[in-house]
Amino acid sequence: MSENEKHLLVVEDDKGLQSQLRWCFDGYQVEIAGDREEAIALLRRHEPGVVLLDLGLPPDPGGVTEGLATLKEILSMAPETKVIVVTGDHDRANAVKAIAMGAYDFYQKPVDPDILSLIVDRAYHVYELERENRRLQGGRENMPLDGIIATSSSMLRACRTVEKVAQTDITVLLLGASGTGKELFARALHQLSPRRKKRLVAINCAAIPDNLLESELFGYEKGAFTGANKQTRGKIEYADGGTLFLDEIGDMPLDLQAKMLRFLQERVIERIGGREEIPVDVRIVCATHQDLPRLIKEGRFREDLYYRISEITIHIPSLREREEDLLVLARAFLERFNQEQGRSLKGFDEGAIRAMEQHDWPGNVRELESRVKRAAILADGRYITAEDLGFVAGDEAPQPFNLKQVREEAERKAIHRAMAQANDNITEAAKLLGITRPTLYNLLEKHGLKA
C-alpha cells in the first residue's frame, strides 16, 4: 500500500447503498464490508483513516447492537481512526450513544453524497493532522540525545547528566551492562561538547590483545620492535583536540594501567621506543560493564586510576530497568528495518507484546534490536508475532503469587502499554484502557508515572 493512498472503509450491508457509496468518494481507496467480521479483516489489512459505519448490521439489521459492537472493536484496535456512524432517520439517541463511545461524527439517512463527502474529507483531514502531530511529538520526546531513545525516568536522568557535563572536559565513566548503549552515550558527549568538530577516537580495550594494546594507544617509533618499520601514531595522538573513548577499560592489563594513569595526570605520552614527551589535549570518556570496586579489591584494577576516570559516573540502566522504553524502542527499530528492507509491517500483535514484556532481556537493547530485525525479515503477516521474534512457549518469566503485587504490576504495565500505543496522548490512552481521563491521571500519579 502506498503511503499517499487515502483509505476509506464503508461498513454497510445494503447492496444498493454499497454500490452508490463506492463511487461517491473521489480520491479515496474505498473498501466495502457487509458485516462486522469482514469490517475487522479489512481494518487490519488496510488501516483506513476513516470508517463510515452503518449501525444496522446483520445479524441485527433492524437494531444497533451489532453496529455499536463493531464500533467498540474498531476503536479498541485503531483508536486514531475516525469513525462516522450512519443512523436511521430520527435516531439521534443512538447517534449520541455512538459519539459517547468514541465515534468522530454521525450522519443520518437518507444519504446525500455531497454532504457525506464533506464530512468524510473533514474527518480525514483531522486524522492526518493528528498522525503528523504524533509523529513530530514522538520524534522530539523520544530523542533526548541524538540517537538515544528514552522515555523512562532512569534513562532520562542519564541523558540529562550527559547534557550537563558535555560542555566541560571532565573525565566521564559510563557504567552499564553489555548492549545498553554505552558507545551511543560517548558519541552524545562528544557531539554536545566544544570538541565536536574534532575526532572521536574509540578503542575497545577488551578486543585487542594485551601485547598490542599499548602500541595501539601510545604508538611506536621506527625500530622499536620487530616489524616496526615506520613511526606510527597511537589512538591517543589521533584524538588530539577531540575525544578518546576507552571502551571496556576494566579489561585493561595492570601494567598498562600505570602508563595510562601517568598520561591522565600529565597529559603527555611517549611512543614505544621513543624518548620525546608529546603533549596531547584530549577529553577522556571511559566505559565498562565490569564491577570496578570488586576488581580493585581483587587487585586487578588500580584504585588511583579508578578515581581519575570516574570524576563523573553515569549509570546506563539495563532494558529490565527501563521497561517503559521497551515498546517505544521496538517500534523505532521496526520503522528503521521497514525502511531498510522495503517492508510495510504495521507493528506487533498482542502475543508479541506480551512475550517482549515477559522476557528478561539479558542482551539488553542490542538483543531487542537483533530480535526485531530477525522478525522484520521472517514475518509473513502485517503484524509481528512472538514466533517471529524467536520466542517459544516457556520463555515467560515466573509470576509472583501475591495478589496485590500481581494487580498493581498488571495495572502499571497496562498503563505503560496504553501510553506507548497512544504516543502519550492521554485521551487515546484512556480510551484504550476503558477509563476516563481523570481516572488515568490518578493512576499515573499513583504509580509515580508522568504523562
Image (cartoon, rainbow, N blue to C red):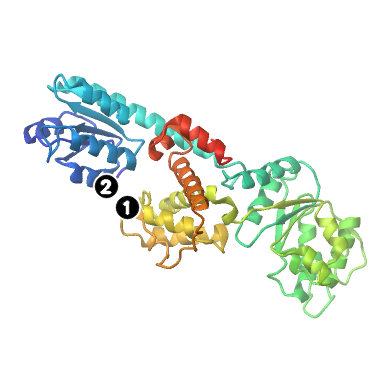
The three-letter amino acid code for the residue at tag 2 is Arg
Q: Position of residue 283 (x, y in %)?
A: 79, 51
Q: Position of residue 64 (x, y in %)?
A: 17, 32
Residue drawn at (85%, 66%), measured in percent from left and top? 302
Q: Secondary structure at mark 2?
A: helix
Q: Which quadrant of the structure image shows residue 175?
A: bottom right
Residue drawn at (43%, 68%), measured in percent from left and top? 394
The residue that mark 1 highlights is 382
Residue drawn at (81%, 71%), measured in percent from left and top? 300
Q: Residue furthest bottom?
A: 226
Task: Give the vertical position of 247 relative to 273 (above or below).
Answer: above
Image quadrant where one finds the N terminus: top left
Report crowding for label 2: few under 14, some 14 to 19, many 20 or more residues within 10 A (C-alpha): some
Q: Are marks 2 and 1 in contact (CB under 8 Å)?
A: yes
The three-letter amino acid code for the residue at tag 1 is Arg
For the question of whether residue 157 can be seen, the reply is yes
Q: Nearer the viewer, residue 150 or 72?
A: 72
Q: Is residue 450 left or right of residue 169?
A: left
Tell me the distance, in whole angstroms, between the alpha carbons under discs 2 and 1: 8 Å
The residue that mark 2 highlights is 45
